[in-house]
């Protein structure tokens, strides 16, 4: 099985609104695949179609070499963005229940649930009710419920949203573990830096359409360079100057740092010189491949579909990371 | 038919619900109610307030009040004797029997009568009665009157009078064991001397009134000097005029005694007098299933009203179970569990699993009620009012408990289909309750109709309501006292099955769409629009598009 998942010209509409438009994808077995795009782009709808919670209006979906998505449900693991627990159930019972729903026998599910919970540091909570868990522990339990039945393909919808740094790291390690075990992992995110860190492949979706896909390397190579500047003080005047001189085409100013997209054929030396001349105190100046964030913004602009700035603003990212999950 | 995943969902629902407080409250509420009812009954019969009365009798030598007291005791004796079934049979053909025949009949029925006695006190009483009656008959046979016909009135009175001392020796509690509580266990005669007065005391009225004010006396009677002539100036004085039992008991006895005096004065024979004064009354009877008529006793009357209790319990059970289904559906949505579940099971499996699991919970509850009710009847004390209703027989009647369980299931499924569908579109219990209001208003109808329907189980209103599917289970239970003809049972069963088939098809459609919806719940009109969409399609929900 070369591809864990193949989507062929899949579309999904809700009334007048097209949620996913003509999407084709091939996801190699054993890879970590990132679905990236802003909120409302169609990531969750795509995932729900893969999980056969929704059915596409057009196109075909082949999951784990099967055309009947219902029949492979038990081989998939799914952690939705919005997830919860039965508050009054005991922790090990809940995890075991999720495993049984995926086809494990009761005894096997019970044993595995205990084993996994202990391994992930929840041994003391086996017989506690779910409502006594902290938020982080709750999320761990949910993830374990997804993995109990040893799924071949794991789909995580916004797995990092609402996690604190410690749990974020744990989630990242778990995803990497899954890859090492030979599983295919798909996860969606609208925070580009996370995708950048761990993905083998990425697919960008914007306004229901795929705008870019490929390996991380391919995507980066296609999309040229970016300059990262760390500075002190107010950089707005200096950056505006760069723009008017035509040295850069885009500035993503985060206050203390900025990513500059050099204009066609511009020598980065010129940019540095101009910045120094403007009197801005530069602490760091670095020329490298453009970040996923920049690539995304550029791609969107080139695709001719405008994107509202706030959809990708730094504050949005901060809100998401800082526990603002719904 | 039930696949593994449906069964898993059902089992979880059952196990989780059985662990809830609501469930255990439900299980224990009936035994508690039962206990209170039996306890109250025992207490009431034990501590039945004895009503004291005095009589200011102005008749010559107080002959009337003395006669009334004797008559009261004798009346009690006679009604206690009346409970001897075997004796009633002998009495019926009384005018045609001779003394020897009667004696033989008495002897042969003696052991049956004693066996039929409800308790030892009754048995002892019956034994004395048979002894006295046999002795009286034997005396006549010995006197050579063996082939003369029995003058029943005189004979009964003679035996009755001999029984009075036996009766007078009994304690009020023993008396109450003779038959549901005889009058003497309820009323106590207080002689005027005890009050410190006499008939000729000019202060008598004042002293009697003081005793009433002090609560030492429930009432007093005044009998005029010439009671045989008329009841003018006969008075009943009490502060409690709503409870007329004592008054009617006393005046009944007075009527009897005075009537006998009057008969003597105009020189009628006793038979003539009896014939003249016999009231013309109609016996209560009902038609049995085989088309015969049958006498109506307390048990039958209870049987006719039993459906009210069953409907009420049915209503509580259906309401509880349907509410459970709603709460759990909304819980899964508001806890964001639904998507995880739907990645493992189909919406149909989830819905049917929930419905089945809670059906099992509800059946456990209802089953426990039936068992409690049957076991509870064993603890009803003999000789109490409750025992007269023969509750054990009613509850154990398959028509009742069978209907109860079957109609619980039907009612739960009908309302469950509606609530699971409505619950699936709501994100919080509060939203659900708002949407549910019309359903709850509908649920009140069978409660309001309960009494009218039980009074006329096969009447027009009952029949019309029966064929409104939302009410069918309640109405059929309600009419069980009738009971409705067999064809109605068949027709309503078909109606219920067809209704359920449609209800669940529609519920499934709404559930599929609603269960993933977020945001404001849709209007009823919108939900109805979904119902018209073909199965499997996800209709335009307008605003339910998934986020991100």
Image (spheres, rainbow, N blue to C red):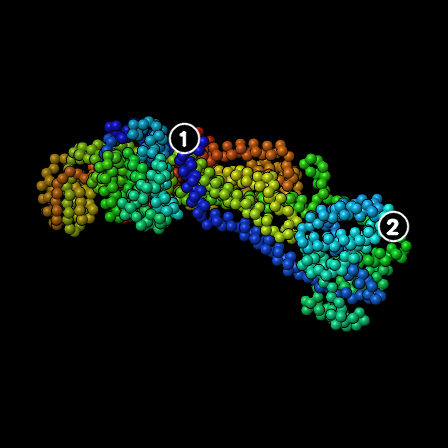
Q: Chain of mark 2?
A: B
- x and y percentages locating residue A268 in the rendered image: 11, 40
Residue in the image at 16% along x and 35% along y: A224
The CA distance from mark 1 to mark 2 is 102 Å
Number of marks drawn: 2
Residue in the image at 81% along x and 53% along y: B136
Q: Is residue B32 positioned above or below B525 on the image?
A: below
Q: Is residue B60 positioned above or below B301 on the image?
A: below
Label 2 packing within 10 angstroms: few (<14), some (14-19), many (20+): few
Residue in the image at 72% along x and 43% along y: B295
Q: Secondary structure at mark 2?
A: helix
Q: Is residue A231 left or right of residue B245?
A: left
Q: Residue B343, located in which quarter of the rendered image?
A: top left
Q: Chain of mark 1?
A: B
Q: Give the residue number, with chain letter if any, for mark 2.
A: B144
Residues at badges 1 and 2 in contact (C-beta under 8 Å)?
Answer: no
Which mark is drawn over residue B537?
A: 1
The reply to whether residue B272 is in sight is no
């Amino acid at each position: 099985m070369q591809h864990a998942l193949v989507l062929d010209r899949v579309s999904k509409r809700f009334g007048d609104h097209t949620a996913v438009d003509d999407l084709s994808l091939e996801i190699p077995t054993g890879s970590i695949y990132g679905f990236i795009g802003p909120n409302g782009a169609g990531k969750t709808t795509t995932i729900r179609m893969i999980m056969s919670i929704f059915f596409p209006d057009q196109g075909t979906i082949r999951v784990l070499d099967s055309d009947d998505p219902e029949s492979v449900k038990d081989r998939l693991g799914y952690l939705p963005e919005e997830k919860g627990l039965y508050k009054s159930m005991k922790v090990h019972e809940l995890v075991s229940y999720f495993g049984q729903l995926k086809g494990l026998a009761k005894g096997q599910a019970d044993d595995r649930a205990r084993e996994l919970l202990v391994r992930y540091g929840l041994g003391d909570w086996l017989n506690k009710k779910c409502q006594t868990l902290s938020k982080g522990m709750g999320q761990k339990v949910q993830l374990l419920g997804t993995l109990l039945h040893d799924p071949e393909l794991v789909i995580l919808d916004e797995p990092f949203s609402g996690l604190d740094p410690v749990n974020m790291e744990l989630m990242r390690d778990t995803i990497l573990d899954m890859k090492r075990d030979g599983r295919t992992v798909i996860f969606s995110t609208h925070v580009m830096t996370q995708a950048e860190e761990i993905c083998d492949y990425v697919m960008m979706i914007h306004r229901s359409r795929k705008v870019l896909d490929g390996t991380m390397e391919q995507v980066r190579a296609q999309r040229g360079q970016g300059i990262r500047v760390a500075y002190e003080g107010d950089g707005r005047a200096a950056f505006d100057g760069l723009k008017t001189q035509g040295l850069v085409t885009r500035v993503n100013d985060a206050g203390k740092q900025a990513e500059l997209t050099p204009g066609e054929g511009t020598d980065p030396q010129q940019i540095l010189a101009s910045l120094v001349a403007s009197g801005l105190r530069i602490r760091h100046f670095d020329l490298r491949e453009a970040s996923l964030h920049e690539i995304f913004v550029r791609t969107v602009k080139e695709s001719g579909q405008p994107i509202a700035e706030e959809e990708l603003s730094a504050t949005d990212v901060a809100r998401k990371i800082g526990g603002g999950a719904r | 038919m039930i696949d593994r995943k449906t069964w898993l969902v059902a089992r979880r629902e059952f196990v989780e619900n059985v662990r809830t407080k609501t469930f255990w409250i439900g299980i224990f509420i009936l035994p508690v109610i039962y206990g209170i009812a039996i306890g109250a009954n025992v207490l009431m019969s034990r501590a039945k307030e004895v009503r004291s009365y005095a009589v200011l009798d102005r008749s010559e030598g107080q002959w009337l009040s003395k006669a009334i007291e004797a008559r009261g005791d004798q009346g009690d004796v006679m009604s206690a004797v009346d409970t001897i079934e075997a004796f009633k049979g002998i009495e019926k053909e009384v005018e045609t029997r001779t003394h020897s025949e009667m004696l033989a009949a008495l002897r042969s029925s003696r052991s049956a009568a004693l066996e039929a006695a409800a308790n030892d006190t009754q048995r002892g009483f019956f034994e004395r009665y048979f002894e006295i009656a046999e002795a009286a008959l034997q005396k006549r046979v010995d006197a050579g009157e063996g082939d003369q016909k029995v003058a029943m009135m005189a004979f009964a009175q003679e035996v009755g009078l001999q029984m009075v001392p036996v009766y007078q020796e009994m304690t009020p509690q023993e008396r109450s064991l003779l038959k549901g509580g005889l009058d003497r266990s309820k009323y106590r005669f207080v002689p005027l001397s005890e009050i410190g007065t006499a008939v000729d005391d000019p202060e008598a009225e004042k002293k009697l009134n003081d005793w009433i004010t002090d609560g030492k006396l429930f009432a007093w009677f005044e009998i005029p000097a010439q009671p045989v002539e008329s009841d003018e100036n006969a008075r009943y004085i009490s502060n409690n005029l709503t409870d007329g039992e004592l008054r009617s008991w006393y005046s009944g006895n007075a009527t009897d005694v005075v009537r006998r005096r009057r008969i003597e004065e105009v020189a009628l024979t006793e038979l003539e007098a009896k014939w003249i004064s016999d009231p013309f009354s109609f016996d209560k009877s009902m038609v049995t299933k085989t088309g015969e008529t049958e006498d109506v006793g307390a048990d039958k009357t209870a049987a006719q009203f039993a459906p009210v209790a069953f409907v009420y319990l049915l209503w509580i059970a259906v309401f509880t179970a349907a509410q459970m289904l709603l709460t759990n559906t909304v819980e899964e949505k508001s806890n964001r569990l639904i998507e995880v579940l739907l990645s493992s099971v189909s919406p149909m499996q989830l819905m049917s699993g929930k419905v089945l699991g809670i059906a099992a919970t509800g059946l456990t509850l209802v089953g426990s009620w039936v068992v409690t009710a049957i076991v509870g009847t064993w603890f009803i004390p003999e000789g109490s009012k409750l025992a007269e209703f023969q509750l054990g027989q009613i509850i154990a009647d398959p028509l009742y408990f069978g209907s109860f369980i079957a109609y619980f299931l039907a009612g739960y499924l009908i309302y469950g289909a509606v609530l699971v569908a409505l619950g699936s579109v709501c994100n919080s219990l509060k939203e659900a309750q708002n949407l549910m209001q019309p359903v709850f208003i509908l649920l009140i109808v069978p409660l309001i109709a309960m009494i009218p329907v039980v009074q006329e189980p096969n009447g027009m209103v009952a029949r019309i309501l029966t064929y409104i599917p939302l009410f069918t289970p309640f109405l059929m239970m309600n009419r069980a006292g009738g009971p409705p003809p067999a064809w109605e049972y068949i027709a309503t069963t078909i109606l219920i099955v067809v209704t359920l088939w449609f209800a669940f098809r529609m519920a499934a459609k709404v559930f599929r769409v609603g269960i993933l919806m977020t945001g404001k719940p849709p209007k009823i009109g919108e939900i109805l629009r979904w119902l018209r969409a073909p199965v499997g399609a996800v209709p335009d929900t307008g605003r339910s598009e998934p986020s991100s």
